[in-house]
Image: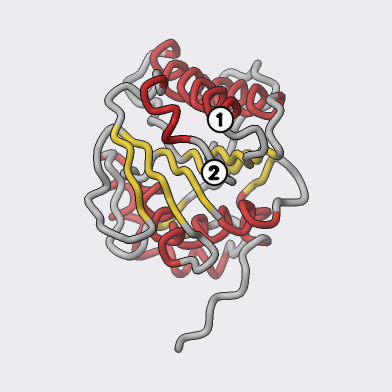
């Protein structure tokens, strides 16, 4: 299986990339990002694109992929609705259109967020915008499209968020995560969990197109036994 990954330098994307490189069924991973992930691996190819809204010059590099894992996004903090929409709506749709032209049978996964507003009419700006993004992606003629809505995600394996606010939040609640995981086992995920679940969807699909945290947890394959 060949995977194209958008956002491999972010917290979620780092976790997804790690799981892709560890998975024996993944033959190749193409990271498309504004900067290098800074890793060397026989499976990993990189396509550094300063302006991700225009992939015209790299379209030949995007041919032949089975799944796209779209993990890019930005926090709403400090952004106007127009700015937030440009990053979290216009960009993923532009990428999706380009990938469809190059790979008509591709499976597309979009990491959205818990609380996303599918009606597109709610009072919470970010939720409306992400709802509009999800709806637009689901209308596109992919082989299959899945919208993932994780809530709290614990970064593992030395992964950290690029957003200062999130780093502070994770530092504060990180020590509580094991207890929270026991209390709310279906609602919390780690970066490892999310990466493994996305690979499971890439290989086998999922029972429905919009997946909340509990749905994502339910898709997790058994943890590989230690050798």
Element on which disc 1 rests? helix
Name the residue rendered at 29%, 34% in the picture. 48
Q: Are marks 1 and 2 in contact (CB under 8 Å)?
A: yes
Work out whether residue 100 or residue 52 is closer to the camera in this orientation and state it: 100
Residue extending farthest right: 207
Horizontal placement of 168 versus 101: left or right? left
Residue extending farthest bottom: 227
Residue hosting label 1 = 102
Dividing the picture into quarters, in which one does residue 105 lie?
top right
Q: Position of residue 66 (x, y in %)?
A: 59, 46
Residue extending farthest front: 60
Name the residue rendered at 25%, 55% in the picture. 39
Q: Earlier in the sequence, mark 1 or mark 2?
A: 2
Q: Position of residue 114 (x, y in %)?
A: 57, 40
The Cα–Cα distance between marks 1 and 2, rounded to whole angstroms, is 9 Å
Name the residue rendered at 63%, 27% in the picture. 137
Work out whether residue 171 or residue 130 is closer to the camera in this orientation and state it: 130
Horizontal placement of 194 versus 160: left or right? right
Crowd rating for badge 1 (residues with CA inside 10 Å; few <14, some 14–19, many 20+): some
Location of residue 169 with respect to 52 vertically, above or below: below
Element on which disc 2 rests? loop
Residue hosting label 2 = 65
């Amino acid at each position: 299986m060949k995977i194209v990954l958008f956002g491999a330098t972010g917290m979620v994307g780092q976790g997804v990339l790690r799981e892709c490189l560890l998975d024996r069924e993944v033959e190749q991973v193409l990271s498309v990002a504004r900067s290098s992930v800074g890793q060397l691996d026989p499976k990993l190819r990189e396509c550094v694109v300063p302006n991700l809204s225009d992939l015209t010059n790299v379209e030949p590099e995007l041919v032949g992929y089975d799944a796209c894992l779209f993990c890019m996004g930005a926090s709403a903090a400090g952004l106007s609705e127009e700015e937030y929409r440009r990053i979290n709506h216009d960009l993923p749709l532009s990428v999706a259109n380009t990938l469809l032209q190059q790979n008509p049978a591709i499976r597309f996964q979009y990491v959205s967020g818990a609380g996303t507003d599918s009606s597109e009419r709610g009072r919470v700006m970010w939720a409306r915008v992400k709802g509009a993004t999800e709806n637009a992606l689901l209308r596109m003629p992919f082989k299959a499209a899945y919208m993932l809505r994780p809530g709290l995600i614990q970064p593992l394996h030395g992964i950290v968020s690029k957003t200062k606010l999130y780093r502070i939040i994770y530092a504060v609640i990180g020590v509580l995560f094991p207890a929270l995981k026991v209390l709310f086992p279906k609602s919390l995920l780690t970066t490892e969990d999310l990466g493994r679940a996305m690979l499971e969807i890439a290989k086998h699909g999922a029972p429905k197109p919009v997946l909340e945290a509990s749905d994502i947890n339910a898709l997790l394959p058994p943890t590989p036994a230690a050798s």
